[in-house]
Amino acid sequence: MTSYRITGARLLGADPTDLLLTDGRLADLDDAPTDAVTVDADGLVALPGLVDLHTHLREPGREDSETVATGSRAAAAGGFTAVHAMANTDPVADTAGVVEQVLNLGLAAGYCDVRPVGAVTVGLGGTRLAELGAMADSAAQVRMFSDDGKCVSDAVLMRRALEYVKAFDGVIAQHAQEPRLTEDAQMNEGTMSGVLGMQGWPAVAEEAIIARDILLTAHVGSRLHVCHVSTAGSVELIRWAKGKGWNVTAEVTPHHLLLTDDLVATYDPIYKVNPPLRTSGDVEALRAGLADGTIDCVATDHAPHPTEDKECEWGAAAMGMLGLETALSVVQQAMVDTGLLDWADVADRMSVRPAQIGRLGGHGQPLEPGAPANLVLVDPAATRTIDPRDSASLSRNTPYAGRELPGRVVATFLRGRATVLDGKLQ
Ligand SMILES: [Zn+2]
């Protein structure tokens, strides 16, 4: 296995230092083998490999939009060394058999660690609990469970799921969307939906479920993770729950940190996503919540869709956007270049905390000798114009096409192996 000597990297944005990667781990520089390959990292920032809690890899079932292999390559290109693969596949990842299949596809691809998320209910049907224990005990060691795409709206089922996962330190990740309040919803409910005459998705539909789940979690003493928080009111609720000392964590997507619902006026379904893009006031509250730690982490909600499902009229289009390859750049623009986070904070919100929430060992650890060599080198001074044709994903539905974004992933290492080098997938 090739050893790498990385020279002049700014560890978490601090002063330049050298790093040695050998036998899959970070090692003392004195132990450098004579044949170690030198990587010039002058001006680059070194971060622990990014960890995504929320990725849709679409396999099994929708291999026309993404596979575990192509999604893993997109993850590596974006600086990720681990992703959590959501359960809304076909068949649904609601048994030990399916989660082990996804795990094995990830191992075969070899570009990042793919940790399956298990469904909370059988077939995402919302009526019967899935075999949570069997998935936890499987080779995939599932710790996060979610019906993402759908909300576990039945309070009794949600309570039982929260109780059940306590036995193995699991967490329920909720897609907070009150279904009756969002029937036929097309975009955020507010001034813009009124102007455009579209059915609105009100903030209260998210906040009502979060409030209920916070109280349920406190009641049973379990662990709740709130997916893709999108409103200012949700941030307030989570801040309140944390103030009580309850075990509630939350994520925000890159697109909710940057884009707003005015973009819907273009009628371009590239901006159709669930939860919907909100107002500039919500974006401001989400940025502040991520900065002060109320929102624990950034998660991409990478949602690939084939062209025919996005290049159609708004009402018929699928919801979702690509995210893995642009997440770090969007976070740099929204949070670092605005002075809200420094690079050490980015490491915390995009690697350390998501690894902790997912109970994922070997990731999100300090970059010091002995630790697994999972890291990314990023050039914060670079800029790039996003061209969907450059994507490693099978799909092209990025909302940033033609936009100039700051930062570029130069190298990604998964246990000491370069998955990306000189900005190119290996
Ligand atoms: Zn969701």
Image (cartoon, rainbow, N blue to C red):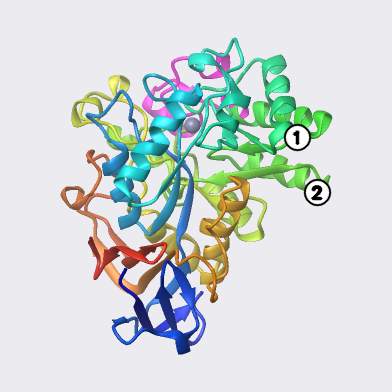
Q: Quadrant of the N terminus?
A: bottom left
Q: Image quadrant of residue 314?
A: top left
Which residue is the site of mark 2? 243
Which residue is situated farthest in the bottom direction here? 30
Question: Residue at position x 27%, y 35% from top?
Answer: 66
Q: Image quadrant of residue 233?
A: top right
Q: Is residue 396 visible?
A: yes
Disc 2 secondary structure class: helix
| Callout 1 amino acid | Ser
Q: Where in the figure is residue 64, as x and y percent of width and height? A: 22, 29
Q: Residues within 10 Å of mark 2 (few under 14, many from 20)?
A: few
Residue 201 highlighted magenta (yes or no): yes
Horizontal arrangement in the rendering, residue 48 relative to residue 273 (left or right): right
Q: Where in the figure is residue 203, as x and y percent of width and height? A: 58, 31
Q: Where in the figure is residue 392, as x and y percent of width and height? A: 23, 49
Disc 1 secondary structure class: loop
Q: Nearer the viewer, residue 20 or 330?
A: 20
Q: Is residue 268 above or below residue 178?
A: below
Which residue is the site of mark 1? 222
Q: Is residue 236 above or below residue 361?
A: above
Q: CA distance from mark 1 to mark 2?
A: 16 Å
Q: Nearer the viewer, residue 162 or 232?
A: 162
Q: Image quadrant of residue 395?
A: top left
- Magenta segment range? 177-205
Tell which circle, 1 or 2, labels the residue nearer the N-terminal end. 1
| Callout 2 amino acid | Gly
Question: Residue at position x 59%, y 32% from top?
Answer: 136
Q: Nearer the viewer, residue 177 or 50?
A: 50
